Amino acid sequence: MIRCLCLLLLGLAAPLATAGDLYKCTGPNREVAIQSDPCPKEWTQVWKRDAAPELPPSDDQLRALQDRRERELAEAEAMSRLAGTARLESVDKPRAKPKQPKASEPELPQHDCRKAHEFADALREKAFLELSNYQLSRLSEWVAEQCREP
């Protein structure tokens, strides 16, 4: 019982560890100090920051990050195919069957030329890719190659 009481008193007497602010100060002789107390009067405060640790990302943030990574991977694979540096698919891998149009819908021909133009336009719209002039010219050459008559 006495031990429990001593431990309780020691626990209450110990200062609680709290995350406070950090201060970066420069002294008159260009000394630099980062401390948890405000800068002395003769020192200059460079910055003050909250020293609280960052919270781990939420489930929604993790899902958004995963979605972004998957989207970027798909875009990178598309660019790799365009540049001709894509990995070759395995011979054993079965190819997906093309969709058959429904009987009620008229079949519209999908030419490689139109698909190439649509793909190139979609790439040009993505400003974050920051395609160089060389890459844009290669893209135009690829479209021209797709649009040649067989």
Image: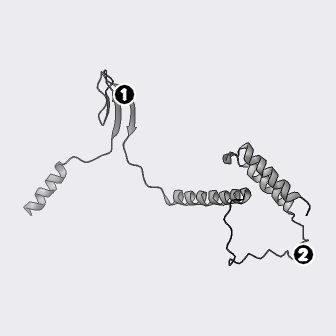
Label 2 Cα crowd, 10 Å radius (few <14 / some 14-19 / many 20+)? few
> Which quarter of the figure has residue 23?
top left
Q: Quadrant of the N terminus?
A: bottom left
Amino acid type, callout 2? Ser
Task: Give above or below for 83 relative to 133.
Answer: below
At 84% from the left and 62% from the top, the residue drawn is 112
- 45 over 86 or under it: above or below: above
Residue 104's disc is 2
Badge 2 marks a residue whose secondary structure is loop
Q: Residue furthest left?
A: 2
78 sits left or right of 58 in the view: right
Decide if residue 103 is on the left or right side of residue 136: right
Nearest the eye: 149 or 52 = 149
Please report the residue visible at 33 percent of the width from the left and 41 percent of the height from the top: 20
Q: Quadrant of residue 148?
A: bottom right
Residue shown at the point (81%, 58%) measured from the top left:
116
User: Contact (CB < 8 A) between labels 2 and 1?
Assistant: no
Give residue 64's position: percent from left, percent from top.
57, 57
Task: Estimate the x, y position of residue 32 in percent, counting from the top left.
Answer: 33, 29
Q: Disc 1 residue type? A: Gln
- Residue denoted by label 1: 45
Instruction: Tell me if mark 1 has few (under 14), some (14-19) or many (20+) residues whose alpha carbon lies within 10 angstroms of its own.
Output: some
Q: Quote the CA–CA distance across marks 2 and 1.
A: 75 Å
Q: Is residue 49 above or below residue 138?
A: above
Where is residue 44 shown, x and y percent of the image? 35, 24
Give the number of marks.
Answer: 2
Give the structural element (helix, strand or loop) at label 1: strand
The residue at the point 85 percent across, 54 percent down is 144
Q: Is residue 89 left or right of residue 99?
A: left
Residue 146 as seen in the image, left or right of residue 17: right
Say which of 17 and 128 sits in front.
128
Work out whether residue 65 or residue 30 is closer to the camera in this orientation and state it. Answer: 30
